[in-house]
Amino acid sequence: MATLYVSPHPDDFRSLLALIAAEFCPSSRPKALTEDPPASLNARSRPTLVLGAGEGESVLSGSSAVSWYLALQGKRAGVDTKQQSQVWQWLSFADNELTPVSSAVVFPLMGMMGVDKKLQQSSRAEMMRVLKVLDQALEPRTFLVGESITLLLFVSLRMFFVLEPPDRTVLTNVTRWFLTCINQPQFLKVLGKVTLCEKMVPVAPKTIAASSDATANGPPKTEAQLKKEAKKKEKLEKFQQKKEMEAKKKTKPPTELLMSTLFSLSPLVSDVISPLPDSYSPQYVEAAWYPWWEKQGFFKPEYGRKNISDPNPRGMFMMCIPPPNVTGSLHLGHALTNAIQDTLTRWHRMRGETTLWNPGCDHAGIATQVVVEKKLMRERGMSRHDLGRENFIQEVWKWKNEKGDRIYHQLKKLGSSLDWDRACFTMDTKLSYAVQEAFIRMHDEGVIYRSKRLVNWSCSLNSAISDIEVDKKELTGRTLLPVPGYKEKVEFGVLVSFAYKVDGSDEEVIVATTRIETMLGDSAVAVHPTDSRYQHLKGKMVLHPFCDRKMPIVFDDFVDMSFGTGAVKITPAHDHNDYEVGERHNLAFINILDENGLLINVPPPFLGMKRFEARKAVLQALKDRGQFKEIKDNPMVVPVCSRSKDIVEPLMKPQWYVSCADMGKQAADSVREGRLKIIPDHHLKTWFNWMDNIRDWCISRQLWWGHRIPAYFVTVNDPSVKPGEDMDGHYWVSGSTEEEAREKAAKRFSVSTDKITLRQDEDVLDTWFSSGIFPFSIFGWPNETQDLNVFYPGTLLETGHDILFFWVARMVMMGLKLTGKLPFKEVYLHAVVRDAHGRKMSKSLGNVIDPLDVITGISLEGLYAQLTDSNLDPIEVEKAKQGQKSDYPNGIPECGTDALRFALCAYTSQGRDINLDVNRILGYRHFCNKLWNAVKFAMKTLGDNFVPSEKAQLCGEESVSDRWILSRLSAAVGLCDTAFKAYDFPAITTAIYNFWLYELCDVYLESVKPVFSKAEEDSTSQRQALVCRQTLYTCLEVGLRLLSPLMPFVSEELYQRLPRRRPQSDPPSITVTSYPDTEEFCWNSEEVDRDMEFIMTVVKTIRSLRADYNLTKTRADCYLQCIDSATASLVHKYSLQIQTLSYSQAIIPLTDNQPVPEGCAVAIASDRCTVNLMLKGLIDVEKEVAKLMTKKGDLEKQMEKLREKMAKGDYKEKVPVKVQEQDAEKLRQSQTELEKVKEAMDNFRKMM
């Protein structure tokens, strides 16, 4: 490991620079020491980086050298040579231009050099000049070089300690850049929270913790004394600040008061006083809000409430997170789940309900054990068996404490408003006790019992695994697959036919199998009872070729007569279907595999062979005996362990099972009777199919990491009690402690406790068992706690439909069994995310998308690098690269969290799959930019002195535009309300998107510009502008509240810029402000909407005519010929809106009997109105006719060529259907365009 020697001084910028750069090297982070480097290194200065150890070590000294090296290691010096040269250029700029002047300003204030006011002032002026160059360079981009943080920001730190608020107002882009970067985790770890400068004054130098110098007034103070003094000083400063704040509050206007309140809440809050940056930057917006929300307690159900037990008239909403695996990292499935769940949670919270979204993490038995075992082997060359069970479990806990909260940080990045103080881990003491209690109760009732049956066995993991951990790999035919523990790939996807000789005759029965090695465990041959080919063999036996085993020919309905020869080999101990046949016909169950996949209970030479080596040996032996018939390709599904990639074997093992018949019936009935609702209802068929045909659940796992099964095998040291067998449930007792279990055993066998010897089961419980009780174990069950009484049962369970059975059904069954209550009232199942082509997300296809890459952006080279770091085969890597290059030729652009969340919700139709196109997410990032610009424009329009009315209401003086936009706002509120209640997320996103983009931005903001431009002309205009401002404010404020659950970051950023209606009492954040409801916003008017719809049809027709005649800048008079006086009156009423939106000179309504002037272009807007656009005198008619003649000729030539092509005799046979459709469409479009050209020519000729 490398060693980094840094200065102990907390303000040494050179050392800070190196420490921050080191944080970007997670895999090779050097060890940081504050002591002097050894003299032998001959290091000239700190920071010093020592690479390697012993004789081969090399030494780097100085801030530039050390930081550049570390930045390269952490990929923060540019992704290619071009970017690296740009970084060097900017570094040179910083060293030569910025560092000298910023040091001259900073150092005197820090007491590092004498104060020369004249020099300081000139240096400050020069620093501002240099920073303006930087500000200009940052205007169109988030970062100076590329799409991520580079070394450049590190070197610019010191200047921000002397930039006062007015400076930051001037340098908006530099400030945005700086704030985005310092809120990254790496910066926070080194610098802590950076408080921006309010006033440039000298500061006292910080104490160096390691200092041993004596003070001037006596011996050095102890650490306790220093802490005490610091605490006293902090209290004094807080008291003083409070006094100053109270004095200032009396004189501050409402807006200023609101801002000061915001900033007194926390230093974490984003800067909302300086003007909005020119363009929207996701990283800037999303950098600081989450820590502030969390610190203020907005995500806690206690927020704004005295006691959570008190009834809330608005209701209660509780939902628990589907606990992600502790080993997991964020994928799009998580992103979709959390986007939906957080949107719902925020909506309920804004409705005033007592709201809890409870986080948690699953211990992920197999996945975690595999990760830690690999780590042990890689780092220490040890297996878990070398360590022993207790020491290995300690290693897992150590790993969990170091790495296990990564998924939580990623969830925070998504803006998930979870109550982190209630976060639970399934191996926590509280949850472990609940798991133990659940097992004991169910075992005592006989619901949990012991049995020896077939399980899914992973030889690599030496454990049974659940169905969800089995990947079904589909093969089309012969395929060689890699198998752990085998040097060569193993053949699958073939069907081997061989013959069994019939005992006592020359006949043979031909059977076929895809697993030829299992014939060593065959105990019968089965045929269909009605198969005439085998009726004469009733009661006959066949002979096993490799041992003296005689096997019966049995007749069973499960056999498919049409497949192969109609005869099937039966291996009851190694096949699920054969197991049932064996049970029905009382056949021998011959286990031929041990836990490691080695052959047992078979004759030599197969004894002790590995299973897939035996595959070849058995095939050869059959050939040698002349009993082999044929081998052919066979499409099949191979079960693969998702954790170890091993081929799963059905294996007979004694395990613990949960009897599910009664619980499954109760779960099914709860849905049938309407007590539990499953949404969407097309999943009901799956639910009933599973519940009505449910099998008992195997809950044993042969692992060390997990909840050890609290069951004990009893040995009674008394001759009157016969010894028990493992499979006899009578000899098993359960207890929370060994003492409790001993008492139970002694009572059961009527002996004293000293005669009882116990052996605890080595296995642990299936992870889904602890997940099944998660909705109530998180609240302290079986203990009666306040949280359990308040929050259980929950309101909703939201998850993917793919775990409907594995998790949802088990929660319902165990909730009813252990608490007598359903764990939730509704289940909402979202679709599964697929790529833009509808393909399943797969690493080998290169279409797996990390949501963080969508949020922050990533280059194509970066995507390639992720593949290189994965465990894919080189061939698969190349295939995946081609997929990435095809889908993301320019990489994935930075979209931000808000855009990703909005896109995922917009995609969530109530179907089974979502085909996610990254370009659509980028479209929503542009939507954020549109919001940004709209609010920026609106804030300018409202003005600094604008004061909103205390309540959103109509004053009666609204213009037609005002009435229309308020009607559309009310409609959006209604649509969102209805859609949220129906879990119709696309309807929510469409309503909000349409209101902001197509109604507020495209129509209203454009139509009211003349109102503001004439605002100062007279008192009437002033009054009209004031009403218009109130309307605009209402639209912005309500529109942002509608948006907040889906786009929490940008909505908060923009909402904080708006003045408040009631600054003294309004909530501090949009997240706890009320969601708009239809009672308050009830201004929807069908008449106004209908009128405006007609007006917009007219506007679009005028715009279309203007485009046809290329009138880009010229305004023309527009005569609107109306069918009746009512329509003419309507047009007159909206004439200002039509004029503004269509860019017309004047709008003149005409009735049928009024003539239209000559020289107009004509277009029909509707059956009520014809548009006549005056062109005479505005265009050169002859020139326009000549242009149109040329265009007409070109179009006719194109059409002629197309017709000739389509008229050829072999066209329909040779040309693909898709191309034929394209040709037909081209011809149709050309025909339409030609007609328009002819019409325009006719109109022009009338003017000549």
Image (cartoon, rainbow, N blue to C red):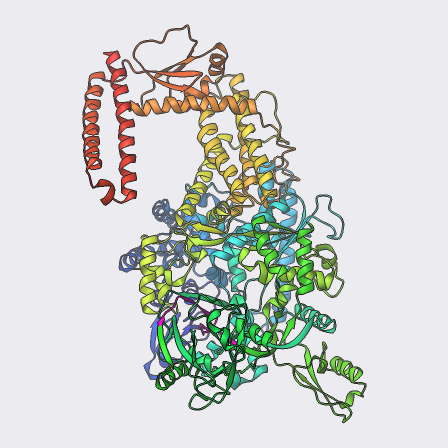
The part of the image, by quadrant, that contains residue 1158 is: top left
Magenta range is: 632-650
Q: Is residue 369 above or below residue 1021?
A: below
731 and 930: which one is in front? 731
Residue at 46% across / 79% down in the picture? 518
Query: What x and y, as percent, mark residue 651?
Result: 53, 77
Q: Is residue 241 left or right of residue 860?
A: right
Residue 927 is left or right of residue 620, and the answer is right
Q: Position of residue 16 (x, y in %)?
A: 44, 64
Residue 502 position in % (x across, y down): 46, 82
Residue depicted at x 21% and y 19%: 1185
Magenta stretch encompasses residue 680: no
Q: Is residue 642 magenta?
A: yes
Kindly tell me whether residue 594 is visible in this rendering.
Answer: no
Asked which quadrant contains residue 1191, the reply is top left
Q: Residue furthest toward the front?
A: 536
The answer to which of 1130 and 1142 lies nearer the viewer is: 1130
Q: Position of residue 151 (x, y in %)?
A: 37, 60
- Total numbered circles: 0
Residue 587 appears in the figure: yes
Name the outermost residue toward the bottom: 719
Q: Please tell me which residue is depicted at 58% across the width and 53% down the height of the picture.
A: 685
For the C terminus, the image quarter is top left
From the viewer's perspective, is residue 90 above or below residue 1067?
below
Q: Split into 4 quadrants, where in the image is the N terminus?
A: bottom left
Residue at (35% x, 46% y) in the render: 129
Compared across the picture, whether 1167 is left or right of 44 comes to: right
Q: Is residue 497 above or below residue 195?
A: below
Pick the residue in front: 448 or 1136. 448
